[in-house]
Image: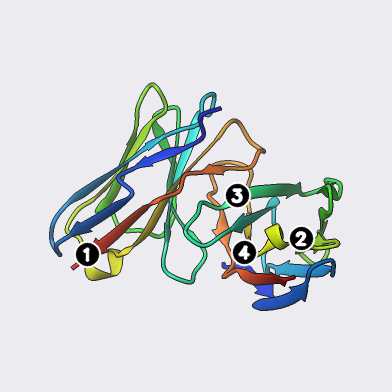
Amino acid sequence: QQPVQSPQAVILREGEDAVINCSSSKALYSVHWYRQKHGEAPVFLMILLKGGEQKGHDKISASFNEKKQQSSLYLTASQLSYSGTYFCGTQRGGGADGLTFGKGTHLIIQP
Amino acid sequence: ETGVTQSPTHLIKTRGQQVTLRCSSQSGHNTVSWYQQALGQGPQFIFQYYREEENGRGNFPPRFSGLQFPNYSSELNVNALELDDSALYLCASSSDRPYGYTFGSGTRLTVV
């Protein structure tokens, strides 16, 4: 079942913060976050595992609420390079499950 | 690291034809997955290979098939192409879980 991402799109000024949410109706083993720029490959940002800790590096971090089966991606003090489409990908099992991606959140950072 | 490379980058085929797409995994990665991405949508999982065996499959018909070779490179074959098969096909590789996937830039397939 496809996870639901919100918002669908967001426009920010450089330096502002953003939160992107990803919700699943099923119990999850892991949540992945990727950023894709137009015409380019999706780039891995981070993975959150069931029972794991909040992850983060630099000004991008994420959390996973197992009770709600919801993950959030936090972008702090956004930079122009953060523009793109953000996808969450979920896995229900730890075996051979592929990722089930949401429809994406379009993020535009303006100077 | 050489990353994931895919070929060709663009391809135009006629309905009913067959197509083979190729992928070279990132060095050290033993798992390769294929995804189909329609315009404006998230990628959809086609199947996954681990050490040359298919070990996971999404909701795609049998005319979508694949191979993984001993050097961990991979092929995606699609038979009897349909207009709806027009999409970006992405290859992704990873090492043993749980790690993120490294995606290639994709092959843009157009079926006319």
* Circle on res. A79: 2
The residue lying toward the viewer, choosing from B62 and A105, is A105
Horizontal side of A9 relative to B108 (left or right) equals right
Quadrant position of the N terminus of chain A in the picture: bottom right
Q: Which residue is mark 4?
A: A84
Residue A83 position by quadrant = bottom right
- Cα separation between marks 2 and 4: 11 Å
Q: Which residue is mark 3?
A: A43
Query: Is there CB contact under 8 Å for labels 1 and 4?
Result: no
Which is nearer the N-term, disc 2 or disc 3? 3
1 or 4: mark nearer the eye: 4
**Which chain letter goes with mark 4?**
A
1 or 2: mark nearer the eye: 2
Identify residue type, mark 3: Val
Identify residue type, mark 2: Gln
Horizontal side of A61 relative to A110 (left or right) equals right
**Label 4 Cα crowd, 10 Å radius (few <14 / some 14-19 / many 20+):** many
2 or 4: mark nearer the eye: 2
Most extreme residue toward the front, as rendered?
A111
Q: Which residue is mark 1?
A: B111
**Label 2 Cα crowd, 10 Å radius (few <14 / some 14-19 / many 20+):** some
- Cα separation between marks 4 and 3: 11 Å
**Which chain letter goes with mark 2?**
A
Which is nearer the N-term, disc 2 or disc 4? 2
Q: Residue at x 70, y 77 (%)?
A: A10
Which is nearer the N-term, disc 4 or disc 3? 3
Query: Is there CB contact under 8 Å for labels 2 and 3?
Result: no
Identify residue type, mark 1: Val
Q: Find residue A78 and report its horizontal and vertical position in percent.
A: 80, 63
Query: Is there CB contact under 8 Å for labels 1 and 3?
Result: no
- Cα separation between marks 1 and 3: 27 Å
